[in-house]
C-alpha cells in the first residue's frame, strides 16, 4: 500500500514535522527543571522554527498533501495545528487566497484580494513599512472572515478547521492547568515566531512587480535555504531554476541573496538603492547653485 503520495523524500518533511511537535512537548516538560538561559534559547529556536515549519513543512503539505490516506493527512494537519498554534485548514485557505492575489495592490475601493499582501496597508501604491507589516500582521488576522470564506467554499473544510481549533484550544487548556507559568513564558516566543513568518513573507515579495505575473515575487536559489525550507518540490528546485532562468532575466525578476528569511540583508533592496543615491541628489541645492564654477 502506498503511504506517501508524491515522493519517498517527503518522509523527511513528515519526520521534521513530527520532531517539531516533539520539540514543543519536550519544551513543556523541561520547563520546570531547565535553567533560564536554556529556556530562552529553546524559546528562540521555537520562534525561528515556526517560520521554518509554516514556510516549509506545512506549506508543502497544504499544496501537496503528503499521504495517500485522507485520514493521515487530517491527523498530520491537527498535529501541525497544535505545534504552530494555528489551524492548518485556516492557513491553507488564507495561503491559497494569497496565491490568487499574490501580494496585489489595493483596488479602487482599497481592497486587496490577498489578505496578507504587503501593499494592503501601504500608502500610494507602495509596500507597507516592513516593521509594521512584520509585527502587526498576525494581530490583524480575522478568524471570522477566514471561517466565512472557508464555509462558503467547502463546508467539510470549515468543520475540520473548527475541529483543529477545538483540539488546539483543549491542548492549551490542559497545558495551562498543568503549568500556567510555561504558557506565560511561551507566549512571547509564539508571537515572535509568527512575526518571523511575516518577515519571510515580506521579503518574498518586496522589490517584486505586482503588475507582472512572473515577477510578482522575488526568487532565491540558495541551496541550503531551499533544502531546509523544502521549496518547490524541494528535490527539483535546481532543475526549475535552469528552466526559467532566461524568462526571469527577460522579465526583470529579482533574484536575491541571501534568501527570503534574511532578505533585509540584500544590498540591492530598493530603499538601500535610494539611500545610496541620496548624497548625489543633495548637490542640487539652492546654495550649491550660487557657488562659482571653476
Image (spheres, rainbow, N blue to C red):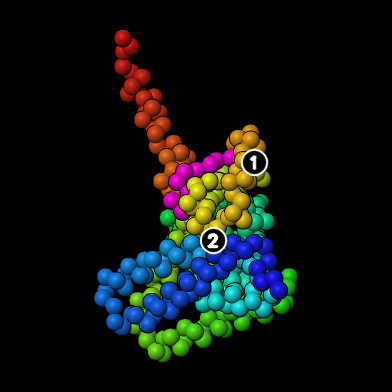
What's the residue at 59%, 40% (across, down)? 253
Task: Give the side of residue 284 with respect to residue 75, left or right.
Answer: left
**Which quadrant holds the N terminus?**
bottom right
- Up the image or down, 39 lies above or below 280; here it is below
Residue 250 lies in quadrant: top right
Residue 193, x across and y down, in percent? 44, 65
Q: Residue furthest top?
A: 294
What type of secondary structure mainly makes up the magenta span? loop
- Which quarter of the rendering shows the C terminus? top left
Residue that carries the numbered disc 1 in the rendered image: 244
The answer to whether residue 152 is magenta is no
**Quarter location, residue 58:** bottom right
**Of the residues under marks 1 and 2, which one precedes in the sequence?**
2
Which residue is farthest front? Answer: 1
CA neighbours of label 1 inside 10 A, class few (<14), some (14 to 19), many (20+): few
- Position of 188 compared to 194: left or right? left
Q: Which mark is residue 56?
A: 2
**Is label 1 in contact with label 2 (beta carbons under 8 Å)?**
no
Above or below, comparing residue 63 to residue 31 in the picture: above
Residue 203 visible in the picture: no
**Magenta segment:** 253-262
Residue 64 in sight in this render: yes
x and y percent of residue 194 in the render? Answer: 47, 65
The local crowd at label 2, few if under 14, some if 14 to 19, many if 20 or more residues have their Cα within 10 Å, is many
Q: Residue at x 47, y 87 (%)?
A: 173
Amino acid at each position: 500500500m502506498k503511504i506517501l503520495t508524491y515522493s519517498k523524500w517527503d518522509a523527511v518533511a513528515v519526520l521534521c514535522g513530527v520532531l517539531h511537535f516533539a520539540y514543543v512537548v519536550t519544551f513543556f516538560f523541561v520547563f520546570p527543571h531547565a535553567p533560564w538561559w536554556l529556556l530562552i534559547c529553546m524559546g528562540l529556536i521555537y520562534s525561528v522554527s515556526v517560520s521554518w515549519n509554516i514556510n516549509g513543512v506545512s506549506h508543502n503539505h497544504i499544496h501537496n498533501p503528503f499521504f495517500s490516506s485522507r485520514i493521515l493527512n487530517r491527523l498530520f494537519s491537527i498535529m501541525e495545528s497544535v505545534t504552530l498554534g494555528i489551524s492548518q485548514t485556516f492557513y491553507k485557505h488564507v495561503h491559497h487566497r494569497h496565491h490568487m492575489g499574490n501580494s496585489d495592490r489595493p483596488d479602487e475601493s482599497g481592497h486587496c484580494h490577498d489578505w496578507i499582501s504587503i501593499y494592503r496597508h501601504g500608502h500610494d501604491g507602495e509596500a507597507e513599512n516592513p516593521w509594521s507589516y512584520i509585527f502587526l500582521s498576525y494581530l490583524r488576522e480575522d478568524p471570522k472572515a477566514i471561517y466565512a470564506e472557508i464555509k462558503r467554499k467547502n463546508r467539510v473544510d470549515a468543520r475540520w478547521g473548527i475541529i483543529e481549533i477545538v483540539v488546539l484550544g483543549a491542548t492549551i487548556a490542559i497545558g495551562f492547568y498543568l503549568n500556567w507559568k510555561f504558557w506565560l513564558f511561551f507566549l512571547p516566543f509564539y508571537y515572535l515566531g509568527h512575526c518571523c513568518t511575516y518577515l519571510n513573507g515580506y521579503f518574498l515579495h518586496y522589490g517584486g512587480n505586482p503588475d507582472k505575473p512572473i515577477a510578482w515575487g522575488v526568487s532565491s536559489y540558495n541551496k541550503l535555504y531551499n533544502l531546509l525550507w523544502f521549496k518547490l518540490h524541494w528535490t527539483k528546485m535546481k532543475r526549475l531554476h535552469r528552466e526559467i532562468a532566461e524568462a526571469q532575466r527577460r522579465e526583470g525578476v529579482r533574484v536575491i541573496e541571501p534568501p527570503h528569511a534574511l532578505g533585509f540583508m540584500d544590498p540591492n533592496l530598493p530603499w538601500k538603492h535610494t539611500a545610496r543615491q541620496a548624497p548625489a541628489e543633495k548637490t542640487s541645492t539652492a546654495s550649491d547653485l550660487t557657488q562659482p564654477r571653476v
